[in-house]
């Protein structure tokens, strides 16, 4: 592209942004790199998961503007400055903005919500219910007011009830509000399979459905190593052992870390979902989706295979399940419903 047409393209883009009432993009980095999609991602929570999400979004040039918001003064600003100073080294053209002001999130195309407290050893994800619900309520309110067209990927635990709460509070269609769990749980299962088979993890395709908790449902029958069924490669008792380790995958890391919970794989999984939506990749991923009769369930969120594209959850796939998996899926739905009922009992939803 010649300099004249580049300037013209930038001018048209700036005018479009102004029309949308957004702050003009003055960053030299952005202006120098017009190939970066002119859009805005907000990551809520500048803790371990949130800051890793923001970094991955920047490294992947997913948006021209990445807002990192937290309630702790200075933290998101410091992280943003640090990340921006890595731009020249990593060759990314996004601008990261750290803030404590929800106004700066206005007009975002997509939110990744990681705000809240993580687990401590001995805690279940449900132990976080009340405290994180209050955080999700506040965040959902400013998402609804400032970014009424946004997609929302909820990461805060207990995931399935927090995403249910976020949808109820924003009033957004279920297609635009989803939870990150299955991508992470499947990635964990994939890693254990790769270790057991000695096959490259890139060749492993694993599927884990249900709640993001101890009742999640790994599906070995839908898991292959480059098309070869898992049961051809690994004995049944080893598959059962790996499934169990996957269910406890988060707790295993919490116990090792002593303070805080996992963040690299949760952030990678969240950003993979964001990329599939924003770049219309139509990836088939296990996603916590709002169910409207699928799998015989109505009005709850649960991890199921879905296609993510520019409309959000574009299609939920109903795959055939054996009796055992169906029983487990019903059990997992019961665990989610219990948490949601607790939210109602505490008048949080
Ligand atoms: N708005 C914005 N940020 C908030 C708010 C709020 N209302 N309340 C808390 N936070 C911030 C905290 O200040 C903290 O910086 O959320 C951040 C959470 O970060 P960490 O404590 O490092 O937790 P993290 O490991 O990132 O996990 C975040 O993701 O995987 C889940 O279970 C995990 O629910 C937890 C979430």
Image (spheres, rainbow, N blue to C red):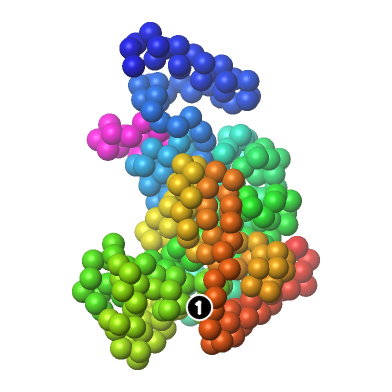
Tag 1 secondary structure = strand
Q: Nearer the viewer, residue 246 or 103?
A: 246
Tell which of 234 and 183 is nearer to you.
234
- For the N terminus, the quadrant is top left
The boundaries of the magenta stretch are 79-96
Question: Residue drawn 43% across and 39% down?
Answer: 62
Most frequent secondary structure within the magenta stretch: helix
Vertical placement of residue 71 versus 38, above or below: below
Q: In the image, residue 15 lies at what x, y percent?
A: 56, 16
x and y percent of residue 91 in the render?
28, 34
Q: How many marks?
A: 1
How would you rate the neighbour count of disc 1 (Cα within 10 Å): few for under 14, some for 14-19, many for 20 or more? many
Q: Quadrant of residue 203?
A: bottom left
Q: Position of residue 277 (x, y in %)?
A: 51, 46
Residue at label 1?
217
Horizontal arrangement in the rendering, residue 122 relative to residue 94 (left or right): right
Q: Quadrant of residue 48?
A: bottom left
x, y (%) of residue 245?
Answer: 39, 80
Please state if 8 lies on the left or on the right of 313 as rendered.
left
* Badge 1 residue CB within 8 Å of ligand 1: no
| Near-viewer residue (142 or 327) | 327
Which residue: 65% across, 44% down? Answer: 143
Instruction: Please tell me in which quadrant of the rendered image residue 191 appears.
Output: bottom left
């Amino acid at each position: 592209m010649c300099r004249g047409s580049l300037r013209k393209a930038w001018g048209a883009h700036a005018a479009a942004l102004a029309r949308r009432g957004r702050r003009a993009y003055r960053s030299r980095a952005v202006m120098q790199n017009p190939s970066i999609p002119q859009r805005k991602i907000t990551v809520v929570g500048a803790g371990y998961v949130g800051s890793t999400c923001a970094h991955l979004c920047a490294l992947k040039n997913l948006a021209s503007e990445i807002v990192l918001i937290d309630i702790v003064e200075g933290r998101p600003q410091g992280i943003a400055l640090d990340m921006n100073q890595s731009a020249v080294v990593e060759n990314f053209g996004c601008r990261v903005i750290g803030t404590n002001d929800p106004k700066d999130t206005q007009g975002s195309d997509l939110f990744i919500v990681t705000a809240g407290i993580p687990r401590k050893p001995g805690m279940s994800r449900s132990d976080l219910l009340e405290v994180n619900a209050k955080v999700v309520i506040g965040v959902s309110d400013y998402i609804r007011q400032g970014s009424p067209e946004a997609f929302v990927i909820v990461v805060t635990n207990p995931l399935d009830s927090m995403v249910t709460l976020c949808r109820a509070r924003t009033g957004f269609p279920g297609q635009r509000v989803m939870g990150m769990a299955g991508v992470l749980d499947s990635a964990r299962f994939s890693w254990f399979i790769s270790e057991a088979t000695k096959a490259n993890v890139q060749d492993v395709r694993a599927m884990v459905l249900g709640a993001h908790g101890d009742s999640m449902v790994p599906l070995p029958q839908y898991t292959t190593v480059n098309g070869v069924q898992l049961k051809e490669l690994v004995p049944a008792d080893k598959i059962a052992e790996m499934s169990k380790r996957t269910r406890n995958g988060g707790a295993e890391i919490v116990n090792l870390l002593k303070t805080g919970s996992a963040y690299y794989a949760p952030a990678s999984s969240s950003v993979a979902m964001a990329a599939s939506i924003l770049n219309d990749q139509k990836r088939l991923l296990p996603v916590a989706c709002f169910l409207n009769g699928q799998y015989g369930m109505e009005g709850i969120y649960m991890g199921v295979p879905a296609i993510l594209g520019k409309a959000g959850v574009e299609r939920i796939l109903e795959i055939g399940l054996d009796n055992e998996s169906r029983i487990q899926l019903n059990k997992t739905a019961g665990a989610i419903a219990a948490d949601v009922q607790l939210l109602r009992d505490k008048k949080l939803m």
